[in-house]
Image (cartoon, grey):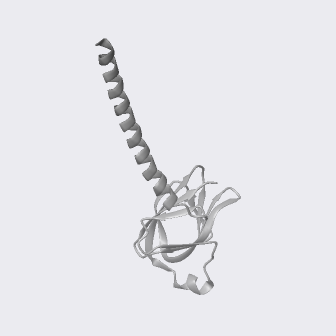
Amino acid sequence: MATHTVRIPRLALRLVFGLALGLSLASGTEVVAARMACDDPSNLCLEEASGAKWEAGKTVAAKEKKKRSDKTTGSLSLTVEGGRGSLFFNGRYAGTAPLSGISVPAGKSDVQVRDGATVLSQGVLTVPKGGALTITVKHP
């Protein structure tokens, strides 16, 4: 009878650990799926972007620069995963990551994120009027 009382707790422990492991793997799968959804080849992921658009490797044409509005602005936050980086907005230094809530002009703008001389990501970012954008750049 002593063997039965020892086996029951072991079985219960196996069930509990199996359930805990299964739950942790399931939540890890959701995290992996979320990261895979944000796996852009340009290393830049745009979140909370109602009306915003990212075009990797492009630059703003002179006509588009005239359309850009300094009167209406948006808000931009930047994080760099796995390293460091500096944000250049329309060719001007805007700050070093992490940045939170910096004011940027609405419309199309040239964006470049660099770590020293290494360009992590560059392209054209369309900022909606009054929009709040969150950018995550993955350091290679």
- On screen, residue 25 above or below 99: above
106 in relation to 117, above or below? below
Rendered position, 20 above or below 106: above
Q: Residue at 61% across / 54% down in the picture?
A: 139
x then y, percent, for residue 116 = 68, 55
In this rendering, would 1 be left or right of 47? left
Q: Nearer the viewer, residue 118 or 22?
A: 22
Could you say where residue 128 lies in the image, as x and y percent from the top left? 44, 75
Q: Is residue 134 visible?
A: yes
**Residue at left offset 61%, top offset 64%:** 41
Q: How many marks?
A: 0
Please provide percent x and percent y for residue 135: 50, 62
Residue lying furthest right in this view? 117
- Residue 19 location (% of width, % of height): 36, 38
Toward which corner of the image does residue 6 lie, by quadrant?
top left
Query: Does residue 21 lie above or below 130 as drawn?
Result: above
Q: In the current view of this chain or complex, which residue is farthest to the top?
A: 2
The residue lying at 49 percent from left, 70 percent from top is 104
Closest to the observer: 66 or 34? Answer: 34
